[in-house]
Image (cartoon, grey):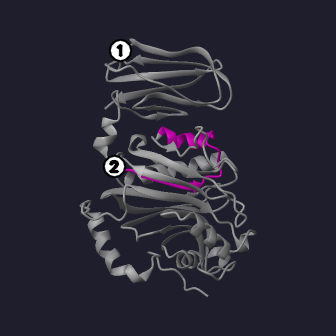
């Protein structure tokens, strides 16, 4: 039997240190000499769906986590001392993996009794800050929640978010994402390195997920540019700013412990100066639909062989360039580089047509 979780939900052995660091972190004056983590961490998202949910045991789940060895693991479908499960599951997993744990309840007084159900983090170090967002169910099947922890990587503030979206409809997921994105923005600057991980219950191509890309997020992808996870297509890791992160390796291994497979990524946070030095052309920011405007040019994805046209037009109306003109392109990711010095108007419109349908038309600006 495990005790009912406290609101902060972290291991108590490091409690005094955590209190001090939260105060410092909250002021925005993080001590740059203090780095919880190096510039590289292994991030994992995992819907554990175990035991009372109909899959493997929690000890099986702990084995999976220990075998993969994530630095930070966002977990969905966590029971907490409720009528379905008397165990504080996240505490159990924290003890089995020797990791700190932080919980956010999506539903309290679960099924009319005590206890709760929600999402959480396991992390190698205690978080320096914690924020929670309650997402009332509205037309959805049940209440949801989002949880953010703050850490430092190479001395820089980084924000990590875990959530679990409605399974019933894209419309419900859209409403939930429309609550999550302003909450993310309210917690810091647009330039903050942010990673969000979840069982989104949505493919990357779903209209609801386009909202994340419109807000500047990009997906962790495989070697061939495919959006993971490749097995179930609904568990994702997204990040922004795109030019601050390098994805070194990824994995989406199959385990029987849950009917959802863990998705992990070894992610490196690039130094801002180094990131700019790696760009050969002015950095253009924004993400529009499935088409990302980044430092290396215009990058976009097509799900199958398609006829594509792409052009960039200055705000003044001057055509800057046509990068593709009705070409048949294979399924996958394509990059068209901007020649150095071509972006002179300060802002432009990118227009992309796929199979005769105008998919994107949006304003981008040069930093």
The residue tagged 1 is 316
Residue denoted by label 2 = 189
x then y, percent, for residue 81 = 61, 81
Please name the residue shown 33% across and 28% down the image: 282
Which quarter shows the N terminus? bottom right
Front in this rendered view, residue 65 or 115: 65
Q: Considering the image in quadrants, where does the C terminus appear?
A: top left
Q: Which residue shows up at 44% across the image and 23% down it?
A: 337
What residue lies at 42% left-to-right and 34% top-to-bottom? 286
Q: How far across and down, in percent of the image, does residue 340 sit?
A: 34, 21
In this picture, which residue range is highlighted in magenta?
193-214
Quarter where residue 341 is shown? top left
Q: Is residue 229 left or right of residue 126?
A: right
Residue 127: quadrant of the picture: bottom left
Residue 218 in the image: state x and y as whole percent.
50, 42
Asked if one can make out residue 281 in the rendered structure from this viewpoint, the answer is yes
49 on left or right of 219: right
Q: Viewer-proximal residue, 356 or 179?
A: 356
Find the residue positioned furthest to the bottom.
1
> Which residue: 30% across, 36% down?
277
Q: Secondary structure at mark 2?
A: loop
Cα–Cα span, label 2 and label 1: 30 Å
Q: Secondary structure at mark 1?
A: loop
């Amino acid at each position: 039997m495990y005790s009912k979780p406290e609101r902060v939900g972290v291991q108590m052995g490091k409690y005094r240190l955590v209190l001090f660091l939260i105060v410092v972190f909250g002021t925005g004056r993080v001590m740059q000499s203090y780095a919880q983590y190096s510039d590289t961490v292994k991030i994992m998202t995992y819907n554990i769906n175990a035991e009372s949910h109909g899959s493997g045991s929690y000890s099986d789940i702990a084995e999976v986590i220990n075998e993969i060895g994530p630095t930070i693991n966002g977990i969905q479908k966590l029971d907490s001392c409720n009528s379905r499960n008397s165990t504080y599951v996240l505490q159990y997993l924290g003890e089995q993996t020797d990791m700190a744990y932080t919980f956010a309840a999506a539903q309290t007084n679960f099924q009319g009794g005590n206890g709760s159900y929600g999402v959480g983090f396991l992390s190698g170090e205690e978080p320096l800050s914690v924020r929670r967002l309650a997402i009332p169910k509205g037309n959805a099947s049940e209440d949801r929640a989002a949880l953010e922890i703050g850490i430092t990587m190479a001395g820089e503030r980084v924000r990590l978010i875990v959530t679990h979206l409605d399974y019933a409809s894209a419309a419900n997921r859209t409403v939930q994402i429309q609550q999550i994105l302003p909450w993310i923005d309210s917690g810091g600057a647009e330039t903050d390195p942010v990673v969000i991980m979840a069982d989104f219950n949505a493919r990357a191509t779903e209209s609801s997920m386009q909202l994340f890309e419109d807000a500047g997020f990009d997906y962790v992808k495989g070697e061939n540019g495919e959006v993971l996870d490749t097995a179930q297509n609904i568990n994702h890791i997204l990040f922004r700013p795109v030019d601050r992160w390098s994805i070194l390796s990824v994995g989406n291994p199959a385990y029987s412990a849950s009917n959802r497979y863990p998705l992990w990524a070894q992610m490196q946070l690039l130094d801002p100066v180094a990131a700019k030095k790696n760009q050969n052309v002015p950095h253009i920011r924004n993400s529009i639909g499935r088409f990302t405007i980044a430092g290396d040019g215009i990058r976009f994805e097509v799900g199958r062989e398609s006829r594509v046209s792409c052009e960039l037009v200055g705000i003044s109306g001057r055509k800057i360039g046509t990068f593709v003109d009705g070409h048949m392109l294979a399924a996958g990711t394509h990059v068209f580089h901007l020649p150095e010095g071509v972006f002179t108007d300060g802002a432009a419109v990118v227009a992309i047509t796929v199979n005769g349908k105008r998919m994107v038309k949006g304003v981008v600006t040069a930093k």
